């Protein structure tokens, strides 16, 4: 029996991102519009049992790391129950979460006790007004309290994900870099991607990794060498004096497609082999129609074999996905 998930380009799939809900209490400008979002009916969401079942099949095929995301994953009720279910799957080494941080202060302890290992908090600004401008919500204080609680609960090192947009928050590069140097927090700069429905994306609004590094150099930060762990999207920069770490995800200027080893499970039970896929594979339908493990494995293997070479941002033929990042699971 096949025990490995390898696509037609020889990339071995080891990372799974699971979206547990499409709902969100923020309205980040680069992700979703202020008004008019419609949400999936609860019955359309995969149940926790279904998620665990699919993940077990994937773990058996070699998936080693799982990240829960959304929408806002902490809006899904009793998330620690799912974390505990996933923690019981043999072979899964790592369970992580990406969150906007709003509910973190109240949930961090339970999540850690259930088996969560690592957490990424999306935080695009440390300035209250800019935060509100980007998230369309005045919630900075709550997110900061959530990060403190996550560190207390043992979920460190917490990683902060910041999407930089020219003219909006690119004035905060120095502030973020200082935060990374003075605390057990890794700040990761993510290039702004053309995927939201109301995002005002244009190439000149993207702050590239090269530009951030240039600015850090001008500001006198002693950045040194890059390392990228196998199959990880971020380039990791350490400071020459050893204090702190920064990460860079250059999805637009230098995509990591060649070594991409991830697939995504949407909250309504579809498998996506690329963030920018234009097609998906339904797993929920067959599962609810009574498909057994063998059949689900077969469907997954077929979908993964057709994993795209990479995305085409800034190249002819690029097509925006017809789902927002929140409904795909970022
Ligand atoms: N709600 C959670 C959060 O914000 O962390 C999880 C879901 S969110 C869609 C996952 C990540 O996608 C966030 O770090 C967010 O910044 C990122 N994201 C959303 N739209 C993006 C875009 N157009 N370009 C780059 N990153 C984006
Ligand atoms: Fe919500 Fe995350 Fe999208 Fe912001 S990035 S609107 S927090 S799903």
Image (tube, rainbow, N blue to C red):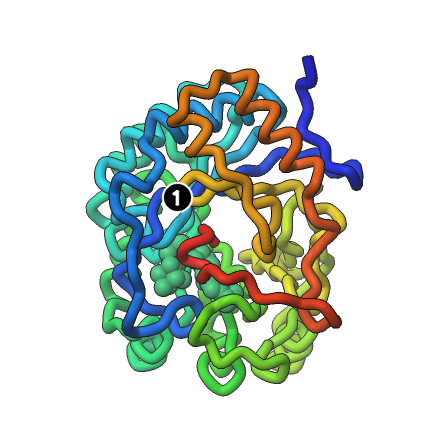
State which quarter of the image contains the N terminus. top right
Quadrant hosting residue 307 = top right
Q: Position of residue 69 (x, y in %)?
A: 41, 47
Residue occupying image coordinates x 45% and y 62%: 324
Q: Looking at the image, which residue sits at the far front? A: 289
30 is higher (above) or lower (below) than 323: below
SS at badge 1: loop
Quadrant hosting residue 238 = bottom right
Number of callouts in the render?
1
191 is higher (above) or lower (below) than 298: below
Residue occupying image coordinates x 48% and y 33%: 283
Q: Is residue 268 visible?
A: yes
Q: Is residue 126 visible?
A: no
**Quarter of the picture for ligand 1?**
bottom left
Which residue is under mark 1? Answer: 267
Q: Position of residue 116 (x, y in %)?
A: 38, 34
Residue occupying image coordinates x 63% and y 37%: 303
Residue occupying image coordinates x 52% and y 43%: 264
Give 154 or 308, whichever is nearer the viewer: 308
Give 128 or 10, whichever is nearer the viewer: 10
């Amino acid at each position: 029996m096949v025990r490995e998930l390898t696509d037609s380009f020889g990339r071995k799939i080891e990372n799974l991102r699971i979206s547990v809900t499409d709902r969100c209490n923020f309205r980040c400008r680069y992700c979703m519009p202020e008004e008019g979002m419609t949400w999936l009916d609860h019955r359309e969401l995969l149940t926790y049992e279904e998620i665990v079942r699919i993940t077990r099949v994937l773990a058996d095929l070699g998936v080693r790391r799982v990240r829960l995301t959304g929408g806002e994953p902490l809006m899904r009720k009793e998330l620690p129950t799912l974390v505990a279910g996933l923690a019981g799957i043999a072979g899964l080494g790592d369970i992580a979460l990406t969150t906007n941080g709003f509910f973190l202060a109240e949930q961090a302890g339970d999540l850690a006790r259930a088996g969560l290992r690592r957490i990424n908090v999306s935080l695009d600004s440390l300035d209250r007004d800019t935060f509100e401008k980007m998230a369309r919500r005045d919630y900075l204080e709550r997110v900061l309290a959530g990060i403190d609680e996550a560190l207390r609960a043992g979920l460190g090192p917490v990683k902060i994900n910041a999407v930089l947009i020219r003219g909006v928050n690119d004035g905060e590069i120095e502030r973020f870099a200082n935060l990374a140097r003075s605390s057990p927090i890794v700040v990761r700069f993510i290039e702004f991607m053309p995927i939201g429905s109301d995002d005002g994306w244009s190439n000149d609004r993207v702050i590239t990794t090269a530009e951030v590094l240039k600015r850090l150099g001008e500001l006198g930060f002693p950045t040194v060498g890059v390392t990228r762990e196998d199959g990880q999207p971020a380039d990791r920069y350490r400071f020459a004096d050893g204090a702190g770490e920064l990460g860079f995800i250059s999805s637009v200027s230098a995509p990591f497609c060649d070594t991409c080893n991830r697939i995504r499970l949407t909250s309504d039970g579809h498998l996506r082999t690329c963030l920018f896929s234009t097609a998906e594979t339904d797993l929920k339908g067959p599962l609810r129609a009574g498909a057994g493990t063998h059949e689900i494995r077969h469907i997954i293997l077929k979908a993964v074999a057709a994993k795209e070479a990479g995305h085409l941002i800034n190249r002819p033929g690029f097509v925006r996905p017809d789902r927002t990042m929140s409904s795909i699971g970022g």
